[in-house]
Amino acid sequence: MCRVGVTERDIGPGIPEQTGLPAGCGRSSRAYPALLAARLHLAGGQFRDVSCSGARIADLSRGQSTANGVNPSQLSVLSPATRLVTLGIGGNDIGFADLIQRCVTAGLLRQTPCREQLTAGGEDSVAARIRTAGERLTTALAEIRRRAPHAHVYVVGYPAILPADGAACASGLAMTASDVAYLRLKEQQLNTMLRARAGAAGARFVDTWTPSLGHDACQAPENRWIEPLLPATQAASLHPNARGEQGMAEAVLATLR
């Protein structure tokens, strides 16, 4: 039997149709794990989506409390029968959503740019968080290999959330252009870490950044994969919309092939 164990980050919050339990995890039938399973013609017990909004690496091996129920340890679905695992994790460990909020607040209140706040004293606090997340990911990948020794493991990277030209839509993002550039750089560094840790653990890395270029939150509604601060469709702000989930599913499929 081919079985997929899917252990993910925020997969489809706000995108209809919301599905699965607990409801507080925000899974969607149009998120890329479900789209991937459909393209692979998996049904019923062959596919498990145990993703949960807000998950950190530690939540892979412990219960995660949500506003509506507790999500069991995500790794509990894995077994020697598992043949494919996709893992998207890390953004919540470095507090990326909180970083965006901090930069938005700094922009709205005309405070010192958050880039300067986060690199005060010559030390980049976000870079330190990325290093710590990398160490935790290595441990998690070893545990996945122990539980599912016959599985092909794919670590799924993050799509481009912010534009290359921060000045072009800094006002729409309520951030300074320098803060947009800083956060974009940190996301690239996060992806670099994910790629390196995946390779060291014998897993494959799925690049969703490259296919998402030109589809960031500052693009026109019909073209973007990421919703802006004020979403124009049913999806969480600065998260992939249904078009973005489709694009990410295609990236995973391309790597599988």
Image (cartoon, rainbow, N blue to C red):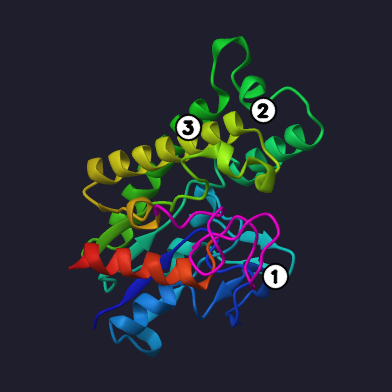
* N-terminal-most mark, 1 or 3: 1
Q: Position of residue 13 (x, y in %)?
A: 61, 67
Instruction: Give the structural element (helix, strand or loop) at label 1.
Output: strand
* Disc 3: which residue: 132
* Disc 2: which residue: 114
| Mark 1 to mark 3 CA distance (whole Å) | 28 Å
Instruction: Estimate how packed mark 1 is, as few (under 14), some (14 to 19) or many (20 or more) residues with alpha carbons within 10 Å.
Output: few
Q: Position of residue 184 (x, y in %)?
A: 49, 39
| Mark 3 to mark 2 CA distance (whole Å) | 21 Å
Is 223 a magenta residue? Answer: yes
Q: Is residue 74 above or below residue 58?
A: below
Amino acid marked by disc 3: Thr
* N-terminal-most mark, 3 or 2: 2
Chief secondary structure of the magenta portion: loop
Is 94 a magenta residue? Answer: no
Q: Position of residue 53 (x, y in %)?
A: 60, 61
**227 relative position to 30: left or right:** right
* N-terminal-most mark, 1 or 2: 1
